[in-house]
């Protein structure tokens, strides 16, 4: 099945070898994030002469890692856990292992602690997960069982722009519950708080209120991936994904130029296609002079969502969870009940900073010893905040962790924090700290950045957008770049 999916969804584009006569390059890519590198690799595989310009001194965008607390502690600066990466048809088609890359799989994908001292574990087995949900176990098996068994078919439909379905039955099975608000679906299907809480935690990755339509799609997608492929991390840090992508691109003859910010598209080398792995706001700033006025107005109206407040920790030991089963999971969803998580997400959309924020925490060093010195550990955590927030949420975020892991603060050796505004300073694509490069609600999920049958192509000949501000949206999967490159290759 994997081979069939790769052929259907990540097949090489038609050979467009050296179509741009007289130009130094067939394609220029701005931004070495997951989608920029995916676009470059896709075109290089088709025989194009490709160069990538990256403003920072390291490639990666949302895949960077660094020692930001103490020497020897490796922290993921944005993305940390990669279910979409391991499930991505594009990534699965690449020989990244040949370039030293490996996934690390914790025994359980997710833990969701509760105030009674227990935790819900989402494991690879749907049956094992359902067993921890008491009377809601049968309902959970009905919701996830068939979906997880056909995860490749579901993901081939979800990780794509609008299209004629290739797997209509799988899509219908997914779509019927996916269109609902997550809070409503959880209350309709589940009677107990354990199942409702863990599903709310999954759906809250959407960073939109759980009462909105389509939020159930996020909970379903991430649950399906937990059972279908797991929630792995990159051995050595998320930076290793970027390093392997760059190495593979170079093996295809592609070039990567680091430390080269691009302020004006007219300063770039001429090429048959120029692809921008940037947010719409950055596209306006860099290439606005090349775009027609009507399209500029549409880009200016593109909506950005809440930001994140991010903390990286160096710890002198593992997190002392009250529920010991949390130590089996790479990701811990911290927020308590469905009602609490929903209230936290609503507050953020009202422009408020919740007292009890929903917190996502990753504990990579429990499963990847390269992340910290012997006997020491790292933790990665963030919570949602209003767009552009400059509020320091450290106290509130740590109070939530302490709620389920008393004594956590005593383990902290050092911490590094970033407000939502600082996240944008670190990466201008995170407008206001929005790590998804735009709201992913029903109005803007498939109409990113504008409503179009070819959302990657701009009205300006040869200029394309390939960032997560295009379908299928946020996450480290490379599919936005892959589809943008296919669109560019067709035009060339």
Image: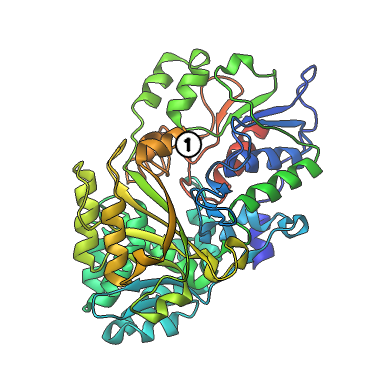
Q: Is residue 219 left or right of residue 156?
A: left
Image point (32%, 82%), residue name: 133
Residue 316 in view in this figure: yes
Which quarter of the figure is the N terminus placed in? Answer: bottom right
Question: What is the secondary structure assignment of the residue under circle 1?
Answer: helix
What color scheme is it? rainbow
Left or right: where 15 falls relative to 391: right
- Decide: is 107 above or below 435: below
| Residue 252 horizontal/vertical position (percent) | 80, 42
Residue 183 position, x and y percent, is 23, 62
- 264 or 78: nearer the eye? 78
Asked if residue 12 is positioned above or below residue 191 in the image, the reply reads above
Determine the image quadrant of residue 325.
bottom left
Q: Is residue 176 visible?
A: no
Q: Is residue 375 above or below residue 382?
A: below
Q: Nearer the viewer, residue 85 or 486?
A: 85
Q: Kindly indicate the quadrant of the structure image that contains residue 143.
A: bottom left
Instruction: Say whether residue 193 is left or right of residue 17.
Output: left
Residue 455, position as x, y percentages in the image: 49, 34
The percent position of residue 331, horizontal first and vertical second, equals 44, 66
Residue 125 falls left or right of residue 343: right
What residue is drawn where x is 40% and y is 37%?
422
Q: Quadrant of residue 457?
A: top right
Quarter that holds the C terminus: top right
Residue indicated by mark 1: 426
């Amino acid at each position: 099945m994997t081979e069939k999916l790769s052929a259907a969804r990540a097949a090489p584009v038609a050979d467009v070898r050296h179509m741009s006569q007289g130009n130094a390059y067939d394609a220029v890519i701005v931004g070495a994030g997951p989608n920029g590198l995916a676009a470059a690799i896709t075109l290089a595989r088709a025989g194009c002469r490709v160069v990538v310009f990256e403003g920072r001194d390291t490639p990666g965008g949302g895949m960077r890692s660094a020692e930001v607390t103490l020497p020897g502690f490796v922290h993921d600066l944005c993305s940390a856990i990669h279910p979409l990466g391991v499930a991505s048809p594009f990534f699965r088609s690449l020989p990244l292992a040949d370039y030293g890359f490996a996934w690390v799989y914790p025994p359980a994908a997710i833990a969701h602690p509760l105030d009674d001292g227990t935790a819900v574990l989402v494991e690879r087995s749907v049956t094992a997960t359902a067993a921890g949900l008491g009377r809601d176990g049968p309902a959970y098996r009905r919701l996830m069982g068939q979906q997880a068994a056909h995860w490749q078919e579901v993901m081939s439909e979800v990780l794509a722009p609008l299209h004629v379905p290739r797997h209509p039955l799988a899509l219908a099975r997914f779509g019927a519950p996916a269109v609902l608000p997550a809070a409503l679906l959880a209350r309709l299907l589940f009677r107990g708080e354990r199942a409702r809480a863990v599903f709310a935690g999954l759906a809250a990755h959407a960073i939109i209120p759980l009462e909105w339509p389509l939020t159930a799609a996020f909970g379903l997608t991430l649950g399906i991936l937990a059972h279908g492929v797991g929630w792995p991390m990159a051995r050595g840090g998320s930076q290793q994904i970027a390093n392997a992508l760059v190495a593979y691109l170079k093996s295809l003859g592609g070039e990567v130029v680091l430390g080269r910010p691009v302020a004006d598209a007219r300063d770039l080398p001429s090429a048959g296609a120029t692809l921008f792995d940037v947010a719409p706001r950055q596209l306006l700033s860099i290439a606005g002079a090349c775009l027609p006025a009507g399209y500029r107005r549409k880009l200016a109206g593109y909506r950005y969502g809440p930001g994140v407040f991010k903390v990286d920790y160096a710890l002198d030991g593992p997190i002392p969870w009250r529920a010991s089963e949390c130590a089996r999971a790479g990701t811990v969803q911290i927020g308590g009940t469905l009602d609490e998580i929903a209230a936290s997400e609503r507050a953020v959309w009202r422009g408020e900073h919740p007292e009890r924020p929903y917190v996502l925490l990753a504990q990579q060093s429990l499963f990847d010893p390269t992340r910290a010195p012997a006997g020491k550990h790292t933790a990665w955590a963030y919570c949602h905040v209003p767009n552009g927030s400059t509020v320091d949420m450290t106290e509130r975020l740590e109070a939530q962790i302490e709620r389920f892991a008393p004594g956590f603060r005593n383990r902290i050796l050092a911490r590094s924090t970033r407000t939502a505004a600082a996240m944008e300073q670190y990466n201008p694509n995170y407008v206001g700290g929005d790590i998804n490069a735009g709201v992913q609600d029903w109005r803007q999920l498939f109409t990113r950045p504008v409503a179009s049958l070819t959302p990657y192509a701009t009205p300006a000949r040869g200029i394309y957008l390939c960032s997560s501000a295009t379908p299928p949206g946020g996450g480290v999967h490379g599919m936005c770049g892959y589809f943008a490159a296919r669109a560019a290759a067709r035009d060339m």
